[in-house]
Every structure is written in structure tokens, then in C-alpha cells.
Image (cartoon, rainbow, N blue to C red):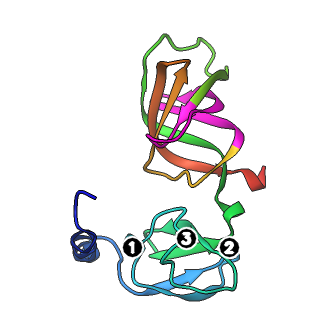
């Protein structure tokens, strides 16, 4: 780790004047309060250890609402993501004429993860959509997504939203 955890938490706690931090509700997928937490800045999507609530089975952080300073926890299946929309994109080849055309590719959203089969398309200016062949876990806004054609990078961007595969 490059920065001590406590230093990161102190810095994040200092942001409280700009972004709500501090004690707030921890809720389940139905929105029912099941506990409290010390601030959204202490959690990441997909986190299991140190969540601070015991429900008799493993629970994961499945979403964070920074504005309301709430954390939603659920089962591992609640982390399934079927696709993403990314912004601030960079395309390294000629774009398809038809923005609705899906292009087969592999994608990575973690540097150390294996490539996953997917499809990508340009959905708007400076925006792309990716749909995964199989649901992925722990994909979250703020992460990068990079699309490949073999070993060559096709395009990439910063994940803005995810699509829950359980609802598809």
C-alpha cells in the first residue's frame, strides 16, 4: 500500500465539509436499516471483510450513495454486473459507422484480472457501453474498463454506471 490506511481515512474524514461523512445508516437491498457505519469513505464495492454487520451469512458492500452517505450490503449475487457505461473514452481505431453496432472483444477492469469475453459499442459522444458474456463481480463506477481485440487495445474509459445482471 502506498499510503497508510489511517492517513487515507483522516484525509477522507476531513472532506466532511464537502461530502457527507460520519455515522449513517447501513441498509440491505430492500433499503431497510440494519446498522450504522462510520462513513462511506471507509468502504469499497465488493468489500466483505470489516463491513461491521453480522447477519449470519457473508455480506458484501453492493453500493454506496455518497450524497446520502449510505452503504448498501447484500449477498455476493447482488454484486453481479451484466454491463457498464463508461465515459471519458479513448478509441484507438476507426469507430464503426453505426453507433448501435456491438463489436466482440475481451475486457479488463482490474489490472490483474484475466480478460473477459464481452461486446462493446459507442453509445454517445465520449461514451461507450460494454455488456459482459458472463456476469462479473465487484465492478464499480470509478474503475477503468479496457477493451481488447486480441492483445491490441481497442478502447477504454472510466466506468460511470453499471447494469445489474440480476435484473436483466
Predominant SS along the magenta part: strand
- Give neighbour class at mark 2: few <14, some 14-19, many 20+ (Cα, 10 Å): some
- Give neighbour class at mark 1: few <14, some 14-19, many 20+ (Cα, 10 Å): some
Q: Closer to the camera, 103 or 79?
A: 79
Image point (67%, 23%), residue name: 102
Residue that mark 1 sits on: 42
Badge 3 vs badge 1, beta-carbon distance below 8 Å? no
**Which one is earlier in the sequence, the residue at label 2 or at label 3?**
2
Q: Closer to the camera, 116 or 38?
A: 116
Q: Quadrant of residue 123?
A: top right
For the residues marked 1 and 2, what is the alpha-carbon distance in whole angstroms?
Answer: 19 Å
Quadrant in the picture for the N terminus: bottom left
For the residues marked 3 and 1, what is the alpha-carbon distance in whole angstroms?
Answer: 12 Å
Q: Closer to the camera, 136 or 19?
A: 136
**Region of the chain picked out in magenta, as a range:** 107-134
From what the image shows, is residue 41 above or below residue 112? Answer: below
Task: Residue 39: give x, y in percent of width and height.
Answer: 39, 79
Image point (59%, 28%), residue name: 106
**Which one is earlier in the sequence, the residue at label 3 or at label 1?**
1
Q: Quadrant of residue 20?
A: bottom left
Residue that mark 2 sits on: 29
Q: Is residue 34 left or right of residue 1?
A: right
Q: Is residue 84 left or right of residue 18?
A: right
Q: Quadrant of residue 144?
A: top left
Task: Residue 97: give x, y in percent of width and height.
Answer: 59, 11
Task: Residue 136: give x, y in percent of width and height.
Answer: 64, 47
For the residues marked 2 and 3, what is the alpha-carbon distance in whole angstroms?
Answer: 15 Å
Amino acid at each position: 500500500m502506498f499510503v497508510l490506511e489511517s492517513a487515507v481515512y483522516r484525509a477522507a474524514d476531513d472532506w466532511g465539509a464537502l461530502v457527507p461523512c460520519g455515522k449513517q445508516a447501513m441498509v440491505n437491498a430492500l433499503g431497510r436499516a440494519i446498522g450504522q457505519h462510520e462513513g462511506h469513505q471507509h468502504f469499497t464495492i465488493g468489500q466483505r471483510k470489516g463491513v461491521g454487520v453480522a447477519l449470519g451469512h457473508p455480506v458484501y458492500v453492493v453500493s454506496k450513495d455518497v450524497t446520502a452517505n449510505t452503504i448498501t450490503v447484500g449477498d455476493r449475487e447482488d454484486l453481479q454486473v451484466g454491463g457498464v457505461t463508461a465515459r471519458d473514452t479513448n478509441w484507438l481505431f476507426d469507430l464503426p459507422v453505426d453507433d448501435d453496432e456491438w463489436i466482440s472483444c475481451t475486457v479488463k477492469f482490474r489490472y490483474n484480472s484475466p480478460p473477459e469475453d464481452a461486446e462493446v459499442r459507442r453509445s454517445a459522444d465520449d461514451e461507450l457501453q460494454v455488456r459482459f458474456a458472463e456476469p462479473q463481480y465487484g465492478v464499480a463506477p470509478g474503475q477503468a474498463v479496457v477493451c481488447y481485440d486480441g492483445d491490441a487495445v481497442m478502447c477504454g474509459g472510466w466506468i460511470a454506471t453499471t447494469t445489474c445482471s440480476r435484473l436483466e
